[in-house]
Amino acid sequence: MTNNGAVPTSSHASPMVDLESISRAKRRIKDGLATRRPWKVMFDFHSMGLPHGVSDAFSRIKTNLAYFRSNYAIVVLNVMFFSLIWHPISLIIFAGLVFLWIFLYFLREEPLKIFRLQINDQAVLIGLSVITVASLLLLANATFSIVAALLTGAVLVLIHALVRKTEDLFLDEEAATT
């Protein structure tokens, strides 16, 4: 039986959106946010104090950077966001870059393929980093604000990592070795 060149139709039209991909992306975002520690633990004032020496300072910084990694990323991203409020074009570029990073680096499970060429994770990381630096520093016209925000975020993170005691933190074995 022929259909005279007509496109065959099905009673079960496939949806425009792949629901499995969306649920997988939601699961990966939740898993990523699950590594965030409670803010109450991060800012427990009873756990603050100056280190006893240089080795204690470096040990605290290393442990706290591993333990509060997601929290520190949120802090730096918020500092960046607030510094770009007065530069709306830069804020739009920043939001676009955040989506690029989320979809091309963090949520991707399969290797990236462009024109049948498989790109490894390291190349994607380098490429996104170059695009981020180039677009924010060259296209955004807010170089001073961006550099100042990154430095401010880094200083805030290092100060917290230095003064937050680590005796009450429970590191899993993977975080302790990184």
Image (cartoon, rainbow, N blue to C red):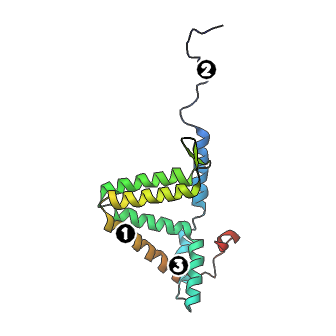
Q: Where is residue 15 drawn, in percent x and y?
A: 56, 31
The answer to whether mark 3 and mark 2 are in CB contact below 8 A is no
Residue 44 versus residue 134 in the image, above or below: below
Residue 150 coordinates in the image, percent (x, y): 41, 69
Left or right of residue 146: residue 25: right
Identity of the amino acid at label 3?
Answer: Ala
From mark 3 to mark 2, how far is it between C-alphas?
59 Å
Q: Residues within 10 Å of mark 1 (few under 14, many from 20)?
A: some
Mark positioned earlier in the residue sequence (3 or 2): 2
Q: Residue at x 48, y 65 (%)?
A: 74
- Give me the residue at 33% from left, 56% from top: 139
Q: What amino acid is at disc 1?
A: Val
Q: Which residue is mark 2?
A: 11
Q: Earlier in the sequence, mark 1 or mark 2?
A: 2
Q: CA distance from mark 1 to mark 2?
A: 56 Å
Q: Which mark is residue 161?
A: 3
Q: Amino acid at mark 2?
A: Ser
Residue at the image point whose x is 36% and y is 71% from the top: 148
Q: Quadrant of residue 175?
A: bottom right
Q: State the SS at label 1.
A: helix
Distance, label 1 to label 3, CA atoms, is 21 Å
Are there few (<14), some (14-19), or many (20+) residues within 10 Å of tag 2?
few
Residue drawn at the location 67% of the way across and 73% of the way down: 177
Callout 2 secondary element: loop
Q: Nearer the viewer, residue 160 or 43?
A: 160
Q: Position of residue 69 (x, y in %)?
A: 55, 69
Quarter residue 41 falls in: bottom right
Q: In the displayed orientation, state which residue is furthest to the bottom.
A: 52
Q: Nearer the viewer, mark 1 or mark 3?
A: 1
Query: Which residue is disc 1 drawn over?
Result: 147
Q: Name the quadrant of the N terminus.
A: top right
